[in-house]
Amino acid sequence: MTTLVKVEKNRKIALPLEFSDKFGIAEGSVIGIDYEDRTVKLHKVPAFSELAGVWGEEMDEVMNKVRNRWKEWK
């Protein structure tokens, strides 16, 4: 599916309402842009508040190992 967007002043992109409603994109949302050659793909970056509870004890252990290895390497 292809959705056309309009590039406005200062290279701002105006997304059609049906597109932004479908994907939950509102003013102030952060959108990632992946590009390859002449193809651009947008992806929504989750807000920090949406990530609450995702970080568990297992991730704490992994990060502690990374931190310790970084200190050893330095």
Image (tube, rainbow, N blue to C red):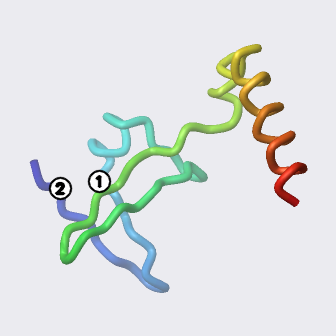
Residue 4 at what x, y percent from top left?
Answer: 18, 63
| Image height of 40 relative to 59, above or below | below
Q: Tag 1's secondary structure?
A: loop
The part of the image, by quadrant, that contains residue 40 is bottom left
Residue 26 at what x, y percent from top left?
Answer: 51, 45
Q: Residue furthest bottom?
A: 10
Judge by depth and name the residue closer to the eye, 40 or 69: 69
Q: How many marks?
A: 2
Answer left or right for 52 relative to 5.
right
Q: Which mark is residue 16?
A: 1
The residue labelled by disc 2 is 3
The part of the image, by quadrant, that contains residue 6 is bottom left
Q: Tag 2's secondary structure?
A: loop
Q: Residue furthest left?
A: 1
Answer left or right for 47 relative to 10.
right
The amino acid marked with disc number 1 is Pro
The amino acid marked with disc number 2 is Thr
The part of the image, by quadrant, that contains residue 11 is bottom left
Answer left or right for 39 relative to 50.
left
Q: Which mark is residue 74?
A: none
The answer to whether marks 1 and 2 mark residues whose Cβ atoms lie closer than 8 Å is yes
Residue 16 at what x, y percent from top left?
Answer: 29, 53
What residue is rendered at 19% in x and 76% in y?
A: 38
Mark 1, residues whose alpha carbon is within 10 Å: few (<14), some, or many (≥20)? Answer: few
What residue is rendered at 78% in x and 24% in y?
A: 60
**Sequence order check, earlier mark of 1 and 2:** 2
Between tags 1 and 2, which lies in front? 2
* Quadrant position of the C terminus in the picture: bottom right
